[in-house]
Image (tube, rainbow, N blue to C red):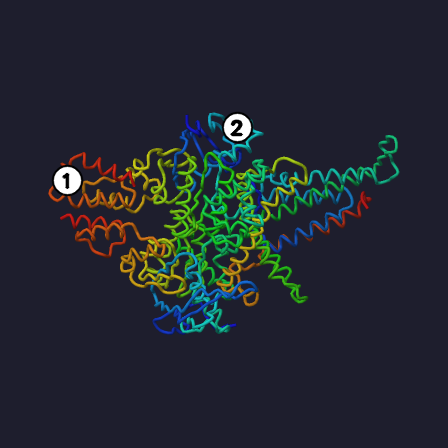
Amino acid sequence: MISDITIGQFMPGSSFIHKLDPRMKIILMTAIIVFIFVVKNLLSLGLMSGFVVLSMLISRIPLRMYFKGLRAIWFLVFFTATLNMLYIKGEHAVFQYRSVTIYEEALWQSGFIAIRLVMIVITSSMLTYTTSPTDLTAAIERLLAPLKLFRVPVHELAMMMTIALRFIPTLLEETEKIMNAQKARGADMESGGIVKRAKALIPILIPLFISSFRRAFELATAMDCRCYTGGKGRTRLNVLRYRFRDFFAFLLMGGLCAGIIYLNTLAPALVR
Amino acid sequence: MGIIETHNLRFVYGKGTPFEKVALDDVSISIEQGEFIGVIGHTGSGKSTLVQLLNGLLRPESGKVILQGNDIWAKPKKIRNVRFEVGLVFQYPEYQLFEETVYKDIAFGPTNKGIKDKDQLDKMIRTAAEFAGLKESLLEKSPFELSGGEKRRAAIAGVIAMQPKVLILDEPTAGLDPKGRDRILDRISSYREKTGSTVLLVSHSMEDIARVADRVLVMNHGKVEMFDKTKNIFKHGERLADIGLRVPQVTQVFLELKRLGADVRTDVYTMDFAKGVAADFLSRKDNPLPDIPKEGIENATQGGEAQ
Amino acid sequence: MEENITINPDNSTDGGEIQISLRDVYFEYESTDESPPKEVLHGISIDIKKGEFVALLGHNGSGKSTIAKHMNAILLPSGGKVFVAGMDTCDENLLTAIRRTVGMVFQNPDNQLVATIVEEDVAFGPENLGVPSEEIRKTVDEALKAVGMYEYRRHAPHKLSGGQKQRVAIAGIIAMRPKCIVFDEPTAMLDPRGRQEVMSAIDSLVRKLGITVVLITHYMDEAAKADRVIIINDGKLLMEGKPNEVFSHIDLLREHHLDVPQATELAQYLRSLGYDIPDDILTPEECAAAIMRAKK
C-alpha cells in the first residue's frame, strides 16, 4: 500500500544516540559528513569507518534498516564509481581493453568515493531513524534562529515542515482512495505509453489538488481558532536542553576530527 | 445460481509484514439478480474489503468471486471489465469529481468502457443523471459549483452511467443532512425498481438499511455474522448490540419492553410496523402475558412487510 | 497583544451569566462580479448562558454553521452585534481574548490536527498563548485525560480512528481552557462508535468541567441530550425550547426536513390514539417505560 511509505522513518528507542539532543545530532552529523571528505588515506578512512560502524551499533537500530536505506542509492554508488574508474587517469594501468584503460589510482579513488557515499547515507539515515520528525523540526528551527536577523522566516519554515510531515500520510491515503475510485470507474492506469499514462493521472491529480486546498483552508481556520499568530511570543511544550551526554559526544567528535587530520598527514593521500 | 457469489473468500492486508492482518476470512455468500442487500458491520469488520473484492480492486488471497457464473480472476488482464459490471461508489464519492462539467464527469466511466457512439453515450449520461435526480441544467455546470448533496449524486451518476449489473454503494449517505440522505435513498430505491439491478448498500445506519434492504449481510471480524431477510436480522437485536452495532431506535423500544417483561415481538424495525405492533400490544387489555392468538401476530407480520 | 492574560479563565472579566449573545445578527457573503450578495442570516438573536448545553439544528444551508462561525469571530456580522463574555467580536484588539474564551471543533478531525504527535498537537494552543512550558505539560495531560486519550499521547494522529482524532482535537481546545466550546457537526464523518466516543466526551465537558457547549448536529439523538434546542431555518430562528418541547412538533420538523427521534414519534402516535403516554419522551427507554405504565 502507498501509505506504508514513511518519510524519514523514526524508530523509537532509548539508545545513547536516541537520547542526544536533536540539535547536537544535527551538528555532529554535519561534522561527520564534512570530515568524510577530509579523509584522504586508508588510516583516516579506517578511523572514520570504525566510528560510523560503532555509532551504528550504539544506535541499536537493526542493521538491515541501514541496508534498506542504501538500497535506493546502490545504483548511484555503482554509477559514480564506474564513471570515476573510466575517466580518472594515472600512471599504473591495471587493465586495458581497446581504448579503455583503468588505472590503479582510479580504482582507489572510485572505491573511496563509493565508501564515502555509503557513509553519508548511513549517517543521515541514523539521524532520521533516531530522531522524531518533531524533534528534528524543533532543532532546525533553533539552529537556524540566528538567520532571523536576516529576515529569514525561520519559524514559518519550521511550521511548514511540521504540517507537511503531519499531512504526508493523510495525502498518501487520500491518493490511494482517489485512485481506487477512478479505477472503479474503469480508469486504466496500467497500460499505454508515457503520454497515455500521464493523461491517466489527471483524474487523480485534480481531485487531489482540490482536496488539498480545502484541507489547507480548513486547517488555517482551525489554527486561527487556536490563536496561532506566528512565532512571536510562542512557548514550547518540550524545551530542548543540552545535557552532559551532549558535551561528551561533542568532545568525542572533536577527538575524531583531530585524529583524522593527524592520520591524514601520516600516509600519502589516495584521493584528491 | 446468484448473479454474484463468493466462495471461501479470504484476504490479508500487509502480507509478509509485521502489520499482517486478516481482513476477510472464509466468506461465502450468494446474491440473486435484483436483490437489494444491506451490508452492515462496524469499522474494521471487513465490509469495505469485501466490496473491493467484489469488483476486482483487490485480489483475494484465496477463494473466488463468481460474477454471472464466471470467476472474475480467470483472466487477470481483463479485470478492468469487471468494474463496468460491478459498479462501486466509494465513501464520499464527491471527492473523485474532476472534469470541467458534470456531463463530462459522468461520461468518464462509459468512455472508459469503450462507448464511442455519441448518441449512445449521451443517452447513457442523461439516463444516469435522471436516476440520480440531477436537473438537466446542472449537467453543463462545473461539478465544483454544486451543493454537497448534488455533488454526491453527480458522483453516483458517474457510476450508474456505466450501467453495471450490480451497483455497490459504500456509505452513500455519510455526512449528509436528513434531506440529502432521504433524497439519495429514494433515488437508489427507484433506480433499483426501474432497472431491476442488484444493489448492495453498505451503511452504518440501521435505520437506512431497515428502510430499503430485502436482505441484510452482517459482517463481524472479517466473517459473515448473519445473512438473512431484514426482519429476521432485527430479531437478534441483542446480538447486534453485542458486536457493536446499533439497532434502530424503534427496535430498541421493543427490546426494552421485552426486558421489562412484556410479551412483545422484537423484530420490529420500521416506524409504521412499530406503530401497529405497539397499538396492538396496548389494546390487548386483559392478558398482558401469553395466550394471544398466533394468527394475530402473523397478520401483523404481513401488514409490516407490506410497508 | 494581551500579554497580561493568564490561562485561568476565571481571572478575566466575566460579563455575567450570559456568555455568548447574538443580537439581531445579519450576515451576507460578499458579492462577486456575477452573483448578487447572498444573505444567509436574517436577524438572529440568541443568548447562550454559562454552563448551558445548547444544540443547534437545521438542514444544510439553513445558516447554522454561519451562526457558529460568528461565535468566535471567524465571521463578523454584516448587521447586528455579537458579544462573547461581554466582548464585541468586531473589536480586533479582542480577537485573541475572544478565541480563548470560545473554542471551536470542526467536522473533519484530520484538518484540525497540526502536529505529528498527539501531545504536541494538544500543546499547540497553549504554546500560541505563550504559556510557560511546565504549565503546558500539566494542561496537556489534563486535557488528554479529560477526553480519555492520555494513553495515546505519544502516538501519531494519522494512526488513530476518527473518533480518537476528534477527541484529540477536543483536547487541543480544552487545553486553552475556554469557557465555551462550539462544535460544528463533530460527528458527521464518524462511525457509530466514534460518534458515541465524541458524544460522551462532550457530555463530560458539560457535566464535569462545567464548560458551556454549543453543538451543531443533524442527529436528533445527540440534540436530545442538550438542555436547549434551537432550530434554524433559512437564516431565521424557527423554534427554540427544551428538547421534548421541540420534538413534540413532529409535523413542523418533518416539513423542514428534520428527523424526529423514533421513540418520540412512536410515543406521540400512541398518545394520539388516546393512551396515557407523556408528551416528553425522547429515548427508547423512556418510551418503553411509558408503554408499560399505560398498559397497567
Q: In the figure, is residue C93 to the left or right of C214?
A: right
Residue annotated with mark 2: B73
Q: Residue A209, image x and y in percent? A: 58, 51
Q: Residue C137, image x and y in percent? A: 47, 59
Mark seen at residue A32: none
Which of the two residues, C266 or B219, is positioned nearer the viewer here? Answer: C266
N-terminal label among 2 and 1: 2
Q: Quadrant of residue C10?
A: bottom left
Marks 2 & 1 on one chain = yes
Which of the two residues, B269 or A80, is positioned nearer the viewer here? Answer: B269
Residue annotated with mark 1: B289
State the residue at coordinates (45%, 42%).
Answer: B170
Q: Quadrant of residue A217?
A: bottom right
Mark 1: which amino acid? Leu
Q: In the figure, is residue B87 to the left or right of C228?
A: right
Q: Around disc 2, counting alpha carbons within 10 Å, would you say few (fewer than 14), some (14 to 19), or many (20 or more)?
A: some
Q: Quadrant of the C terminus of chain B?
A: top left
State the residue at coordinates (19%, 49%).
Answer: C291
Tag 2–tag 1 contact (CB < 8 Å) = no
Which of the two residues, A202 or A169, is positioned nearer the viewer here? Answer: A202
Can you name the residue that lies furthest to the front here?
B119
Q: CA distance from mark 2 to mark 1?
A: 56 Å
Q: Around disc 1, counting alpha carbons within 10 Å, would you say few (fewer than 14), some (14 to 19), or many (20 or more)?
A: few
Examine the rendered structure and indicate whether residue B127 appears above or below residue B143: above
Q: Residue A173, image x and y in percent? A: 53, 45
Which of the two residues, B179 or B223, is positioned nearer the viewer here? Answer: B179
Q: Residue A237, image x and y in percent? A: 51, 60
Check the residue under mark 2 and report the chain it is in.
Answer: B
